[in-house]
Amino acid sequence: MTDLLAEGINFFNAGRYFEAHEAWEDLWRVTRGPLRLFYQGLVQAAVGLHHLSHGNLSGGRAQLTKSTAKLAQYPARFCEIDNASLVNGLREILRDGVLKPIIIVRERKPVVQSEG
């Protein structure tokens, strides 16, 4: 997991959506290939939740709609993230119209230790 991805997750999980957006946007800008769309989805999720938390309902809903469309294209577990829970949480907010915290769960790879 890259430092910027982890930094963004920490901000996001703390409800600091603007800072999460900044970290992930920096990552998105330098990324090419299939990961770029995933990172853009994360950026849009953070922006959408930031807008909602500041009363911009239409802007927030628009960003969350774009975000879920992108993130839903990726596997349930992706980039060491429980992507399925993230997408479901965002869809719940869109459906219910109620802002509630979403925690991005990191799926850590098992560490294999050699016998010495």
Image (cartoon, grey):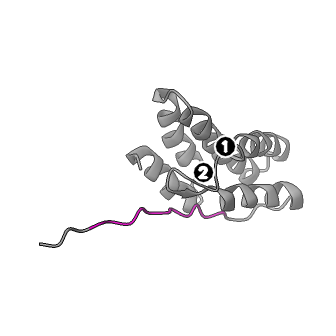
The image quadrant that residue 61 belongs to is top right
Q: Which residues are magenta?
A: 102-112
Residue at left offset 84%, top offset 54%: 94
Q: Are marks 2 and 1 in contact (CB under 8 Å)?
A: yes
The amino acid type, in three-letter code, at marker 1 is Val
**Residue 69: % across, % down:** 76, 42
- Is 16 contained in the magenta span? no
Residue extending farthest to the left is: 116
**Residue 66: % across, % down:** 76, 39
Residue 17 is labelled as 2
Residue at left offset 53%, top offset 47%: 19
In whole angstroms, how far apart are the C-alphas of marks 2 and 1? 7 Å
The quadrant of the picture occupied by the C terminus is bottom left
Q: Nearer the viewer, residue 4 or 77?
A: 77
- Is 106 contained in the magenta span? yes
**Residue 84: % across, % down:** 68, 58
Name the residue beneath numbered marker 1. Answer: 47
Residue 7 falls left or right of residue 83: left
Residue extending farthest to the bottom is: 115
Q: Nearer the viewer, residue 102 or 15?
A: 102
**Residue 98: % across, % down:** 82, 62
Residue 111 falls left or right of residue 18: left
Please count the marks in the image: 2
Residue 8 falls left or right of residue 86: left
Give the answer, above or below, for where 41 lies relative to 89.
Answer: above
The amino acid type, in three-letter code, at marker 2 is Tyr
Residue at left offset 52%, top offset 33%: 28
Residue 30 falls left or right of residue 69: left
Prevalent SS, magenta region: loop
The local crowd at label 2, few if under 14, some if 14 to 19, many if 20 or more residues have their Cα within 10 Å, is many
The image quadrant that residue 65 belongs to is top right
Residue 19 is labelled as none
